[in-house]
Amino acid sequence: MASNLSIGNLAVGGSNTSPANSTGAPEVILEGTTPLIAFRNETGGTDDYVVMNETGAFKIKNDTDNSTPLTISSGGIASFSNGIAFQSATTGSGTGTGYTLDSYEEGTWTPTISFDAGTTGITYNTGSTDAIYTRIGNYVWCDFVVQLTSKGSDTGQMRLAGLPFTSSDYSSGTSLDYVGSNLLFTNVSGTDNGAYCSVLGNTTTGYFYDSSQGATIIDTNITDTTMIRGGVRYRVA
């Protein structure tokens, strides 16, 4: 048998007991330092939750472990502690393995260049060297601009270091797991625009290749004033 509760204008706590709206609609007013409504599990389990206004934010909290699965700020920003779950039905021809969006982030990172991990004497035009990223779920898109003022004295394949997240090593058959977009070069020797940067699995490092020749880009292709613009995308570990 269902139970019904009818409430008109009810004020609990505090001294301001006047209705909050002028429409005459039924309302419940809870006043105090941290007013809350508790939902208890009648079987005595641990699934007890409270809805509360705390430090200017609307929160749903687990009253057992004090965790906060949902917070809505005064500005209307909703924060979920473990992500947002979407429908589990696979709509394409693949096999779905995950349906929860558990990460979104935008930010900056610091790109650096090396030659076989050597960085001796490499200097940058800091006013023209910058990088940004956007992470959605387990993938991150990274854009960067690097301008050298000296390529230094080390030799070997050119590498890109400082990527914002460690990459996933999802393919055991190869060390280079992700291929970036085409790169735009200025002031280089023996290589053309359209080169690319591949990210090595389980690292924060990319390796530069010449797309037209399939060869590595090395120190002799680079000058003291080389500028590189480009981007990479990869799966986060």
Image: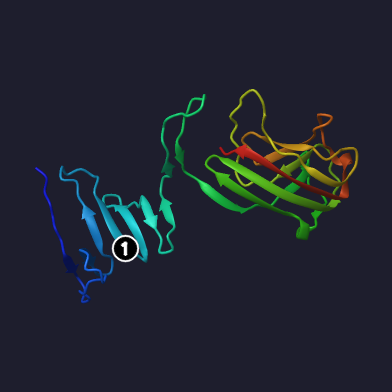
Q: Residue placed at 80% from the left, 52% from the top? A: 147
Q: Is residue 206 above or below residue 109?
A: above
Q: In the image, 143: left or right of 194?
A: left
Name of the residue lying farthest toward the bottom: 15
Name of the residue lying farthest toward the front: 23
Q: In the image, 92: left or right of 113?
A: left
Q: Residue placed at 54% from the left, 44% from the top? A: 136
Quick one: label 1, few (<14), some, or many (20+) residues within 10 Å? many
Name of the residue lying farthest toward the left: 1
Residue 123 coordinates in the image, percent (x, y): 81, 54
Q: Is residue 151 above or below residue 206?
A: below
Quarter holding the C terminus is top right
Residue 36 coordinates in the image, percent (x, y): 25, 61
Q: In the image, 140: left or right of 154?
A: left
Q: In the image, 170: left or right of 227?
A: left
Three-letter code, disc 1: Asn
Determine which quarter of the picture holds residue 60: bottom left
Number of numbered discs overlaid on the protein picture: 1
Q: Residue placed at 65% from the left, 41% from the top? A: 204
Kindly identify which residue carries mark 1.
53
Q: Residue placed at 75% from the left, 41% from the top? A: 159
User: Camera-side residue: 171 or 26?
Assistant: 26
The secondary element bearing badge 1 is classed as: strand
| Colouring style | rainbow
Residue 224 coordinates in the image, percent (x, y): 88, 50
Quarter holding the N terminus is top left
Residue 16 coordinates in the image, percent (x, y): 22, 76
